[in-house]
Every structure is written in structure tokens, then in C-alpha cells.
Image (cartoon, rainbow, N blue to C red):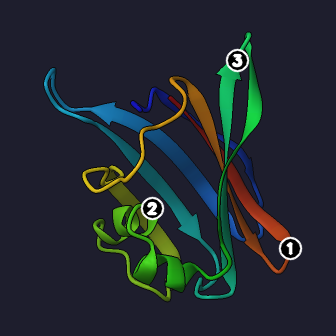
Amino acid sequence: MIPERATVDYINEDYMSGVKVTVRRYGRNSGYYVNIDGTTKHMWGNNISFHVVLYEYLHNEYKRTFVEFHFKRLCDMFKFDPYLGQAVVKTGLKCPVPAGTYHLGNMSIPCENFPYIWPFERARGVGTITYDNVVLGNASLYT
């Protein structure tokens, strides 16, 4: 799957600010990379949850699929997840994440060891960051 574009749908200004998500390609033969820029106003650790829900593009609309990722503890995602967690760790981010401004650049999901064939061509992934059931932010990545 090739990421086409990304949007930031919601940001809770009490916890984050200036969040921007972009998709870049650096050359004709290069891969596509996701860049995330923003400022956190509080320390993030295992108190943060990250959820990804995938929607398949069917008949001019996105329909929710069976594919979902739910990470209840952010630091555990960094340590144990071989796909999303490792994409973030490769940017140099370590857990716990202190408050500050961050640029997570050139992220791509390492799919070399992905054991399955992806079941759909076009999709939208919606990522949601929460803290004690309070939504901190929500962004979408379209493929």
C-alpha cells in the first residue's frame, strides 16, 4: 500500500499543538515517507494509548474493516510492535516522551517481514491517541 495523503482531523489543544502530518516522496524511484511534526505539552509514557482502525474504499465510501490495532501502552508499542512501533523508534524517539517539539521524519512501515497479503487496494487508516479516555488527537492516512 502506498500512502497518498494525510490529514489531521482533531487536536486537543490542552495536550498538543501545531501538529502536521505529511506524505513525501524524495525522488522518482524512492519510497513514500510519512512525516509528523508537533508539540506535546505533557510527558507521554504508558499512560497514552494509540488506536488504528482501517477503512476500505468501496463504492465511493470508506467502510470499516476487520483490521484494527489497539496499543494500550505507548512504551510497550515502541518495544514490542514490529511495524508501527519500529517505524517510530527508527526516528530516534524514546519512551517516555518528555514534553517538547518533535519532528518524526521519514517514517515507513517495515513490510519486509509482513506475513500476509494486504486484502484491499485503497484504504484509510484512522489513528487516535488517547489519555484516560480523553482523545488527544486524531489523524487519517489515505492509501
Query: Residue 8 lies in what quarter of the image?
Result: top right
- The percent position of residue 29, horizontal first and vertical second, equals 13, 25
Is 45 placed above or below 89 here?
below
Q: Which residue is mark 2?
A: 84
Calculate the distance from the C-alpha at mark 2 to the C-alpha at mark 3: 25 Å
Q: Which circle's residue, 1 or 2, is located before the other in the chain?
A: 2
Q: Which residue is mark 1?
A: 133
* Residue positioned 53% across, 33% down in the render: 119
Calculate the distance from the C-alpha at mark 1 to the C-alpha at mark 2: 21 Å
Along the line of sight, the residue nearer the viewer: 42 or 51: 51
Mark 1 belongs to which amino acid? Asn
Q: Residue furthest right?
A: 133
User: Under tag 3, what secondary structure?
Assistant: strand
Is 1 placed above or below 130 here?
above
Mark 1 closeness class: few <14, some 14–19, many ≥20 residues within 10 Å? few
Evaluate if marks 1 and 3 touch, with contact meaning CB atoms under 8 Å apart.
Answer: no
Q: Which quadrant: the N terminus?
A: top left
Mark 3 closeness class: few <14, some 14–19, many ≥20 residues within 10 Å? few
Mark 3 belongs to which amino acid? Leu
Evaluate if marks 1 and 2 touch, with contact meaning CB atoms under 8 Å apart.
Answer: no
Q: Which residue is mark 3?
A: 58
Is 135 placed above or below 77 here?
above
User: Under tag 1, what secondary structure?
Assistant: loop
Calculate the distance from the C-alpha at mark 1 to the C-alpha at mark 3: 31 Å
- The percent position of residue 7, horizontal first and vertical second, equals 61, 36
